[in-house]
Image (cartoon, rainbow, N blue to C red):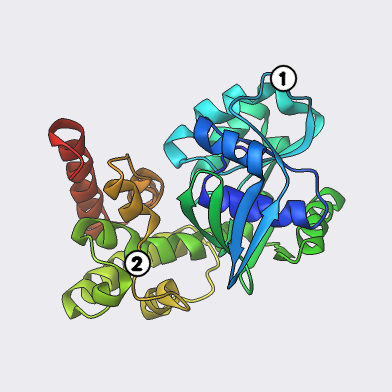
Amino acid sequence: MLGAGALGCSIGGVLAQGGSEVIFVDPFQAHVEAINANGLKMRVGDTEQIVRVQAYTHCERLSQVDLVIVLVKSFATREAIESARSLVGKHTLVMSIQNGLGHEEILADVVGRERVLAAKTYVGGVFLEPGHIISGYQGKQTYIGELDGRLTPRLQAVVDEFNKANLMTTASTNIVGTMWDKLLVNVATGALCGITRLPYGWLYQLPEIEETALAAVAEGIAVAKANDIKLVSEDPQYFWKLAAEGLPSEFKTSLLQSLEKGQMTEIDFINGSVVRWGERSGIPTPVNRTLVACVKGIENWLIHFGKS
């Protein structure tokens, strides 16, 4: 697991419980030390579980592996996979489960397109403290696919490994469409949650926010259709409602969580992806372009004026 944040630990911890040999690599030294000393503390529902797993701050001492799962922040993708070249052997696969679009191109540029799988998950996770997370994997779907849509033995082997651990995983012949489905869920609420600083219970009470969200998603749907991408729905309301399904009123998107920590966000890989694809396709995306500008403005403020 290249990246041991909330989601990396959530998925990696469950895989380890299922019998997979899992190694975490993450630069957060206190987190790595806590996992090695006490195991990964993983809260699932009302139960607290301890998962014994190895963790490292870098890849230098590690041998080649079967699968590298990339779950770093989007803007750190290239640096992370470059640092993990020693893990990649002749038969190693590399798979992103990150939010947004564009990661597979970065990975392919570093390790070769023939090694890359794509995935999208609805599993969630919350980081509590070093070595301690909440895993929201139960009942949440994961989809994995070859970039060309083929069903291959290596794809099925990865899917089987996930399902062995009770991660509900499907081999997809339309992984690009699935990636766009998840992208539109993030487009619906990610930036708006970050800009307003409102958790879902309040975000979903304001009709003006819903109107803006639906307009942003509609732009994404138009771009997807222009590129012959098959979506699960072409109704913006579907993605707006799906974004909040099963989540508590206090839920905050990862984009808002990043801003609250004074960190850069993944806006370029979410709403920014809609803008870039729109430019290539001749589809105007003024709402997404505005949301990107607002988030980048907040990031710039954090850099120059503080984190509060």
Q: Residue furthest right?
A: 153
Give the quarter of the image for residue 136.
bottom right
Q: Assess disc 2: are there few (<14), some (14-19) or many (≥20) residues with their C-alpha within 10 Å of its C-alpha.
A: many
Give the quarter of the image for residue 90.
top right
Identify the secondary structure beneath mark 2: helix
Expressed as whole percent of the image width and height from the top left, the position of residue 191 reads 29, 57
Q: At 58% across and 23% down in the image, what residue appears?
A: 82
Quarter containing the C terminus: top left
Q: Which mark is residue 188?
A: 2
- What amino acid type is highlighted by mark number 2? Ala
Mark pair 2, 1: CA separation: 42 Å
Q: Which mark is residue 287?
A: none
Expressed as whole percent of the image width and height from the top left, the position of residue 164 reads 82, 62
The answer to whether the residues at label 2 and label 1 have Cβ atoms under 8 Å apart is: no
In this picture, is 142 found above or below 290?
below
- What amino acid type is highlighted by mark number 1? Arg
Left or right side of 34 for 114: right
Identify the secondary structure beneath mark 1: loop
Q: Which residue is mark 1?
A: 61
Left or right side of 2 for 30: left
